[in-house]
Amino acid sequence: VPQKAWFVGTDYAITRLPWDTIRGVVIINADSMLLQPSFRATEQAYARLLDFAYRMRGKRESIVVQTRAPSHMIFEALTRNNPALFFKNELAMREALLYPPFNYLVRLIGTQNLNEALAVKKTLEGYAEAHKLSARVRGPFTQEKTKHHLLLLRFHPKKVELELPALNALLPPDWKVD
């Protein structure tokens, strides 16, 4: 890396850079971090950007972020150096959407057969309804790389240890609980 260079690169390079020689970092398409299909996408994007901010602290020209959403809460929290703002907003969103830590999420990984995934969903929903469980079943979703079908179970935090084993017993043997 040339002395006093600007860095544009990949995650792989981040841990291998001589940070004392880097004058600035350009983060291209930061929005892609926010659009990942995970309830933790915002948290992970915040952590990644905070890592850059930490590594570049004290440098005048440190970070340029390309985004179409400059008013997004994570950019505001980072610009203001206010982690409490981020955590307050993130927890409020997760509570409204019933995401962890306010509920448990369990991913079930099935086969490539959509009809089987629909049948498993129907079985789990029927059992949950008949036994008045807190569990809710979402899906099926298709995993792009493998074409396996996924179901997502959502549980009340105080009920997951009681309810998950019963639902797990209803799964076909080739299904996995993640």
Image: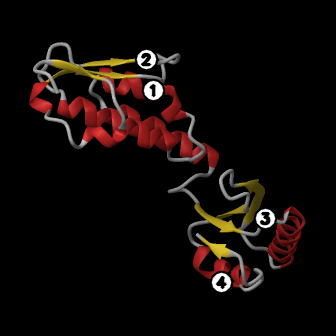
Position of residue 123 measured from the top left corner of the image (x, y, whole percent): 86, 75
The secondary element bearing badge 3 is classed as loop
- What numbered label is drawn on residue 165? 4
The residue lying at 65 percent from left, 75 percent from top is 176
Q: Nearer the viewer, residue 149 or 131?
A: 149
Locate residue 120 relative to residue 102 in the image: left or right. Answer: right
Determine the CA span between mark 1 and mark 3: 33 Å
Q: CA distance from mark 2 to mark 4?
A: 46 Å
101 relative position to 150: left or right: left
Label 2: state its secondary structure: loop
Q: Quadrant of residue 4?
A: top left
Look at label 4 and name its amino acid. Pro
The image quadrant of residue 147 is bottom right
* Residue marked by disc 1: 30
Mark 4 or 3: the one toward you: 3
Type of the residue with mark 2:
Gln
Marks 3, 2: nearer the viewer: 3
* Vertical relation: 117 (above or below) 53: below
Name the amino acid, label 3. Gln
Name the N-terminal-most of marks 1 and 3: 1
Residue 76 spot, x, y in % from top left = 39, 22
Residues marked 1 and 2 touching at CB (< 8 Å)? yes
Mark 4 secondary-structure assignment = helix
In the rendered structure, which disc, 3 or 2, sits on the residue that comes first in sequence?
A: 2
Q: How many marks overall?
A: 4
Counting from the top left corner in percent of width and height, residue 80 is at: 29, 21
| Callout in the foreground (2, 4) | 2
